[in-house]
Image (spheres, grey):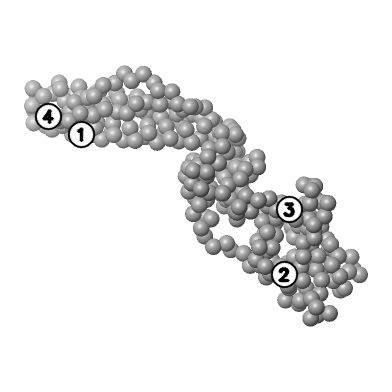
Amino acid sequence: MWARMDETTSPTVFDGSSFECPARLTPAPQHVEGTCAILEGLAQGALECARGLSAAGKKLLAVAKEGRLRDVRATSESFVALAEQLNQQAAQISGAAAFDCEAALSSPSFTEDILAAARQDGLALHADGLLLYCFPHVVRILPAEGAVSIGRKREYRIRPTALVRRLRAEQRKPVRFKPQQFLQLLFSAYLLAAPPDMRSALTGFVVPLSGIYQILTLFPGTSKEYTQVDFARDMYLLDRSGMTSTKDGAVVSFPASTGTRAANVSLSVVTETGQQVRYYGISFVRSASES
C-alpha cells in the first residue's frame, strides 16, 4: 500500500542539537485510511521541521543583531537547509492530499477499512453496499458529499478508524425510542390501510408493512428523511421492547408470510448481534378483556 521514497536529506545541526525529518511515504490511490495515515505522518514531520526552522531562525536573528559575523555562515546554512526540508514536506503533503474524494469513498477499500477497524475495536458492524448497519444506527456513505450520515446527521470526520470510534460512542448512548408512541402510530396507519369492515372488528386482518410505510411517508420528502431502513429498525425496536398493546387494548402481532422471502415486499433489519430479521405484515386483535 505504501512505498518508501528515497531519503535525500541528512541531519542538520543547529544550536548544538540534531534534527532529522522522518522518512517519506507515498499513498496508495483512493485509499482513505492509508492517505490519512500518511498525511498525519507528513504533518507531524512538517511541524518538527517548522520547529527546527523556527529555532534556527531565532539563532540567525540573534547573530545578525549582535553582529557575530563568524557564526553567520553556519547559522544561515542551517536555516536554509531546514527551509528546504520544509518545502519538500509541503510538496509531499500537496501530493498526498491531491486525490479524488468521491472515488475514494466509492471504492470498496473504504468500506473494507471501516469493517477492519470495527473488527479490531470489537464493534458489530455490517455492510450492504453503501449502507453500514451499526445498531441502532444506519450509516450511509455519501461519496458526492465527502461524508457519511449517521442516522440523520452528516459526519465529515470519515477516516475509518476515527469513524469507528464515533460509532462506538454513539452506540453507548441510550436509544431514543418510545415504543408506546410508535405502536399508536402504527395502529392509526393500520386502521387507514385495513378494509372498512375490518377496522372495528380487529380480527387479525394482515396489512403489509410496505403499505403502512407508504401511509407514514405520504407527506412530500418524508421518505428521504425516514427511509424504509429506518422504519425496519423501529419495527425491531418495538418488537424487542415487548410492547404489544395499544392504549385502547388492541394487541399487535407481526405475521410472517412467504413475502418475508421477497425483498421487495418485506422489511429487513440487521440487529446488534448481526442477525438479519425480516418483517412482512402487521395485524391487530382485540384483547380478551376488551372482547
> In 3D space, how far apart are the residues under numbered discs 3 and 1 (Cα atoms)?
65 Å
The Cα atoms of the two marked residues, 1 and 4, are separated by 12 Å
- The correct choice, above or below, for 156 with respect to 231 in the image is above
Label placed on residue 136: none
Residue 157 appears in the picture as rendered: no
Q: What element carries label 2?
A: loop
Residue drawn at x 86%, y 70% is 203
Q: Check disc 2 and give the amino acid type.
A: Thr
The C terminus: image quadrant: bottom right
Give the alpha-carbon distance from disc 2 to disc 4, as whole Å: 83 Å
Q: Residue at x 37, y 26 (%)?
A: 24
The residue positioned 43% from the left and 23% from the top of the image is 3
Along the polypeptide, which appears first: circle 3 or circle 1? 1
For label 4, count other residues whose C-alpha is less than 10 Å away and answer few (under 14), some (14-19) or many (20+): some
Q: Mark 3 points at which residue?
A: 278
Image location of residue 33, percent across then percent down: 48, 36
Answer with mark 2 or mark 1, whichever residue precedes in sequence: 1
Residue holding disc 2: 244
User: Looking at the image, is mark 4 or mark 3 earlier in the sequence?
Assistant: 4
